[in-house]
Image (spheres, grey):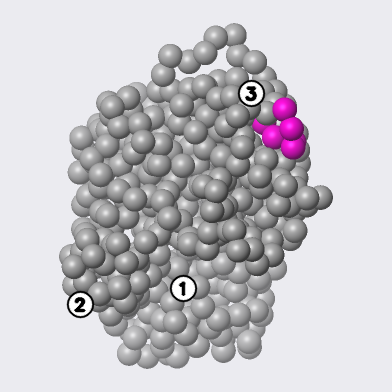
Amino acid sequence: MDAPQPYPRLLRSSLKTALKDTPVVCLLGPRQSGKTTLARTLEPKYAYLSFDDPATLAFAKEDPGGFVAALPARAILDEIQRAPELLRPLKLAVDEDRRPGRFILTGSANLLLLPKLGDSLAGRMEVLHLHPLTAAEQARSKGQFLAALLKGTLKPKIASQELAAPTELIEHVVGGGFPEPLSRPAVRARAWHRAYLRSLLERDVHDVARVRDSAMVGRLMELLALRTAELLNVTSLAADLGIQRATVEHYLAVCERLYLVRRLSPWHRNPANRLIKSPKVHVVDSGLGAALVGLTSNDWSGQRERFGHLVESFVVQQLIAQAGWTDPDLRFWHYRDKDQVEVDLVITRGRQTWGVEVKSAITATPRDGRGLRRLAEQCGKDWQGGVLFYAGNSAFSLGTEQSLAAPLSWLWEM
């Protein structure tokens, strides 16, 4: 039997483009998301050094200037967050020789969120984010849904028959996007996800912050997985964990730096008293979220509310990942007002605004577009259109405001 072909990484073209005009390109993303594989296959002639290797790390920390001076003309430096001492010598080296494509850095922590590191190579480095595999990459499609939404080219499409159950959607949500567990049976995949979190808590937490109790970070992650796609309530989390609010904030920042969760800020056009100002919290990978809360494919019917929240986080992740090869300047928010009218994801480019609602049911009606209509009223002429995702397989107009109900499968079929 032929070996399975590797999944295509749709960020590949963006990485190639950046290397043509930028001295340092930094590829950031969660551990095990494929950063090293992408960098080494894209530029196989680059020298490769990993700071997971103790000897390499020791040299870099003891003599950062000497380490950089000894580097070949072009190099991949893997897991750069372990050797932050190198960033200043790299800056000096680039200032002396600004040829594009000199260094590819990879990091399993978000350097932009780390104190004193985010601007170390400002003006000399482009940052790209490699997410876990999207559903489109797993389906080996081009991942063009977001591009079609931005261009306004989504069209109604009536299917010949409705779905009995959204099997493919369920598999994508429960499976998540890390390559390794996708090849395993469900039970073994869940074991991989739990071991993955344990490994981060044991190895990587201390690279990004001073943490007195890494086990408590793990407990926080379990609570955040249970509350994914909900408004963030730090006071409630502190009470449930029995720790101070400031400690929860600190540990939450650690989880963000390691690409475990993201905070989605509230959208507002102007200061408005009627808008909720709290961020939403989302697990980055739905497969990890499902493993932490014990959800399996068989729970789709019995735990619809919890599954619905996980589907929302899944959609948020898919669209943010697609932005990497579609339009990196897009920004992402959520909308909720004091009438409890909400839009799960708001996408902006300058003042242009799009809305995305997510519904896990296999049916949808124009009434479900209430949030999109409210957001369109807030935006006025800046409104560009919206989509109501649902688990059916037909697409139809919501009747107003350039909005369409569309199958969730379009995320990986387009």
**Can see residue 318?**
yes
Left or right of 403 on screen, residue 341: left
Say which residue appears at 48% left-offset and 62% top-offset. 278
- Between the residue at mark 1 and the residue at mark 2, the CA separation in whole angstroms equals 20 Å
Amino acid type of the residue tagged 2 in the rendering: Arg
Q: Which mark is residue 395?
A: 3
Task: Point out the image quarter for the C terminus.
Answer: top right
Mark 2 Cα shell of 10 Å, populated few (<14), some (14-19), many (≥20): few
Amino acid type of the residue tagged 1 in the rendering: Leu
Nearer-the-camera pick, 196 or 267:
267
Say which residue appears at 65% left-offset and 15% top-offset. 158
Q: Contact (CB < 8 A) between labels 1 and 2?
A: no
Magenta-tinted stretch:
399-404
Above or below for 245 versus 224: below
Task: Point out the image quarter for the N terminus.
Answer: top left
User: For residue 48, what is the image quadrant?
Assistant: bottom left
Residue 33 sits inside the magenta stretch: no
- Between the residue at mark 2 and the residue at mark 3, the CA separation in whole angstroms equals 51 Å
Q: Which mark is residue 212?
A: 2
- Between the residue at mark 1 and the residue at mark 3, the CA separation in whole angstroms equals 39 Å
SS at badge 3: loop
Left or right of 390 on screen, residue 301: left
Q: Which mark is residue 113?
A: 1
SS at badge 2: loop
